[in-house]
Image (tube, helix red, strand yellow):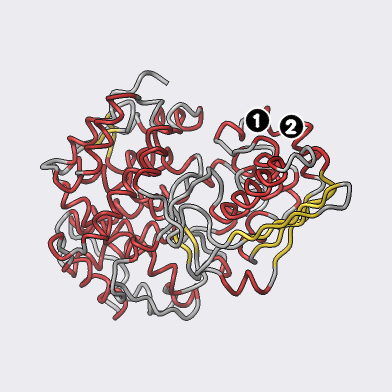
Amino acid sequence: MDATTLRIARHVAAAEFRRLPEQAIHECRRRIIDSVACAAAAYREPFCATIRTFAARYAGTPAARMWGSGERTSIEMAAFANGTMLRYQDYSDTHLGKSNGHPSDMIGGLVALAEAFHLGGEDLVTAIVVAYEVYCSLCDSTALASRGIDQGTCAAAGSAAGAARLLGLGETQAGEAISLALSSSLQLYNVRTGDLSDWKGCAGPNGARNGVFAALLAREGVTGPSAVVEGKGGLRDVAGELDWRVGAGEMPLIVGTHLKFHPVCYHGQAAVDAALTLRDRISGEDIVAIESIEAIEVQTYEAALRAMGGDPTRWAPTNRETADHSLPYTIAVALLNGRLVSADYERERLADPRTLRLMERIRVGCSAELTNAFPAHSRSRIAIRLKDGTTYSHLQNDPKGSAANPLTDAELESKFLELYRPWSDGPAARRTLDLLWSVDQLASVAQLVDAFCHAPDA
């Protein structure tokens, strides 16, 4: 086992709930709450129903349940189906580093494994914190996208680590789990380019599925490559020089991940905030209607331009996956409607003539100033020029929900109660939320899954 894999494996095997900082435990609770809410919101989406139907064909022993419906399937398929639901609306959390990704993609798989093996809340929280540490530290160590590697690779490694912790594997088997996951799960960044496909929302959950499977294999004594990071043909050969270190900070990395206030790619959060601020300013002064805009100039950072404004498809999105990665579309909708919600990505709304006309007036560029501030800060500046020559400008320094401008617990609860409606509302939703706030005190994770497996039919 190479030194990097061994270092990570030792961190995994040594992790204990009693040694976690209270702040990390609280932030883990918040990530679980956010993830369950995102999954509930997407439950009735036709694509998510298709994935559940597919996964239901693969029942196994031990089994886990698909959230909402309560149907039983294999652990790996539950990881995939639940992860896809929580990822589908692009409302889940984000980590920003040399690579960017959505570590909550792993939560569905870790919950499934904990449920199937009758484990408790402390075990789940510890495993999630460990999984985030491995995922986020890999993001921080190297720019994977520049080598054509997708963030789903991080989900495979992180989930393998978290699953190894749940299964109580020692450092040798934990290392094998990570080796098996990495050697079989290098995903292509092509999934994030051009017209985006259904796989955009599945790639991370599929990585999580692979990571859980790798840990189950390691538990049975299956070995992986002996030098998966540092050896010939290993991750370092593919991704370039990397210094992958876990547990190096004073606080677990989960604490620095970002929640979302709007259902849009994280790189669009600050721009949507800026657009809403300008809309309020213009409308509030009763100067002019939104329709009187002459031009909109958007300045952002390089990663945001590449993901959301650097391709012609972003000015002509034909599906949800491309639209929620389009700065022109999301900014135009926010300006016209005064908000951005998941329903704005329904296919019939993508062809709205007013939105399309306003998108034609939007230009997107990046500046060295904003690029140099990233990833510590995700900043976007929007200038709106009216037809009478008046110009309004706003720089959004950190979007609402970022680690630097976090959602309060009350704001997170509001997001949960709004998104949870497809499963239940009122007192039942409040009871589930209270249960989630005490997830680490549960004797069995199955109690948690019980709470949100009584959804009405899709």
Q: Amino acid at mark 2?
A: Ala
Q: CA distance from mark 2 to mark 1?
A: 7 Å
Q: Which mark is residue 351?
A: 2
Q: Quadrant of residue 267?
A: bottom right
The numbered disc on residue 82 is none
Q: Residues within 10 Å of mark 1 (few under 14, many from 20)?
A: some
Quarter holding residue 410 = top left
Element class at badge 1: helix
Vertical comparison of 44 with 132: above or below: above
Most extreme residue toward the right is 388
Q: Position of residue 146 (x, y in %)?
A: 58, 69
Q: Residue 177: x and y, percent?
A: 27, 62
Q: Amino acid at mark 1?
A: Arg
Image side of residue 372 versus residue 120, left or right: right
Q: Give coordinates of residue 46: x percent, y percent.
A: 51, 27
Which corner quadrant holds the C terminus? Answer: top left
Q: Is residue 197 above or below residue 12?
A: above
State yes or no: discs 2 and 1 in contact (Cβ < 8 Å).
Answer: yes
Q: Nearer the viewer, residue 439 or 79?
A: 439
Viewport quadrant of the N terminus:
bottom left
User: Closer to the camera, 158 or 336?
Assistant: 336
Identify the residue at horizontal 34%, vertical 76% (top origin): 245
Q: Which residue is mark 1?
A: 347
User: Which is more toward the observer, 440 or 83?
Assistant: 440
- Secondary element under disc 2, as helix, strand or loop, is loop
Comparing 257 with 240, the one in front is 257
Residue ranking furthest to the front: 285
> With respect to residue 129, does 227 lie above or below?
below
Circle 2 residues within 10 Å: few <14, some 14–19, many ≥20:
few
